[in-house]
Image (tube, rainbow, N blue to C red):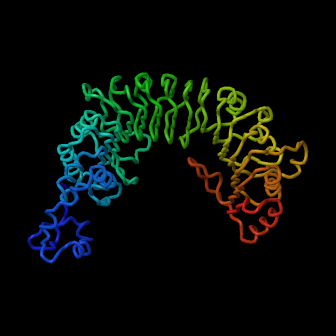
Amino acid sequence: MWEQGDLSETDSSSPPLPPRIRKFWPGVWKRLKPASQSLCEIMAQDLISQLPDDVLLLIIGKLTLLDSVRASMLSHRWNLICFTRPDLVFDRSIMFLAPHSHVLPGSCDCRQYEGKFIRAVDQVLRSYQGRNLRSFKVRFCLGSNSTDGIDRWISFAIGMGGEELSLGLYCDEMDCLDIRCAVDWCGALTEGKYVFQLPNFEGSKSNLKSLRLVACLLGQYSPDQFRCLQTLTVVCSNLARYDLHGMFTCLLTLKTLTFERCTLPGKLSLSSLTQLENFMLMSSAGVELVEISNMNLVSFQCVRNYYIFPFALRRAPNLKRLSFGATTNELSWILYHLPKHCPALQSLAISGFTKLVKHPLLRTANFRKVKELCLIHDEASQFGILNMNRLFRAFPCLQKLEFRAESPDLEEEKAGVKEYVHKRLKRVVMAGFHGTPSEIVCVIYLLTHTTVLERLVINPEFSVHHPWHLWRADISLSKEEREKICDRLQPFCKDGVLTLH
């Protein structure tokens, strides 16, 4: 199917062996070849065909499509079964095993493989004999000039009852400046991109449950084609003028929605997505307001976006994970309304210039079910004994705390501190640690006012390390300083609790 290269022959009368088989053939040949048998006689036995179907399917399932096709010459049953596999993945790096070569800065060699890639995919689909297709994935730098081929593939996948469809029409090289490639972070470039038009595939049965579109443009939508869709992911697409709200009304079964590196309309309302459980907005631009009123929403994450924007949270009684950016102006609303609108909240991550621990409303706030809290501040938050005490009272069930801190002067901490021992906190990550006396006192407070603390991580080199955020800090401690800090803190902690990076 794909070029296998020149192969040396073990026997002049024997057919050529695939490269991967030839590599290990000498040892196998010594064990299998009787003195009176030729290679042709050994291969004519086709021992692979004697294996049960479930064993063959298990072996083929662990191979890439390219490897299974190359090895199909070993057995006539293998040849049949490899074209009935339920998952088809067409990836440049797997199919051609060729690294990108940049002739000029900002250019790539994707286009010289384009015709070969399309022909290879078409050839596999013509030979496909499976009855039910589970997933169909394409990853290659293609654009509008390949529309006919891409449409054929989508029609095939939908017509075969495919449940998962992924079109990654971008270049593997992130520094490639080709107009169709993934370096277009917010999908601002539209020229030359493939347009995904669902009405083109009407009339075929649609079991599509998962759809991922990368470096594509969205065209017209069809309500019937979305009737089973549960997961939608759009990456590197310009949706600023697209009728997202009209499309949302057709997504009656959608449970997971993700926009990554997209340009979106100014107002984004999710209320029509009645079954939505997970929403993520990452590294995107254009949004000025997000409206949330979803009874089934479990996770809402707005991370690494180009600026902080407000969101209107009217009703989300089942929301458990919330991550967003905020300014000091939104803190009053967060501390007062969030516990009421999100009574099931268990994980909270806030980024931005918030100064949460110094806000007056923190004294009366009560997040009774929050177990994880990550405060991702762009500036130090003055975490001292007084503010830590307030935080403990506001989050009585907290089990994991991550924050960037710079403790205030000790004189400011002496007044107004009421003893409070936290009985649930198990893990604390404190970043931006300078080793000042006030910070050491704050760490001692953490060690002595938590009864079940299992791990306290102090990291002077980084601020809070979160799955979606990582800030480097120009802070370093000498070996002598580290030893002094450890000696100072050791009497207050159990063995294995304190970790100083």
Residue in view at x 23 percent, y 69 percent: 22
- Residue 168 position within the rendered picture, expressed as x and y whole percent measured from the top left: 35, 44
Q: Is residue 271 above or below residue 478?
A: above
Which residue sits at x=70%, y=61%? 499
Q: Quadrant of the C terminus?
A: bottom right
Instruction: Confirm whether residue 101 shows in the render.
Output: no
Q: Position of residue 456 (x, y in %)?
A: 72, 56
Question: Number of callouts in the render?
Answer: 0
Q: Measured from the top left, where is residue 234 in percent x and y? A: 41, 37
Residue 50 visible to an observer of this rendering: yes
Where does the image place residue 363, in percent across and percent down from the top left? 80, 35
Left or right of 371 in this view: 192:
left
Q: Residue at x 31, y 29 (%)?
A: 206
Vertical comparison of 318 with 122: above or below: above
Quarter of the image for residue 494 reads bottom right
- Viewer-proximal residue, 177 or 394? 394
Q: Looking at the image, which residue is at 17% across and 69% down? A: 7
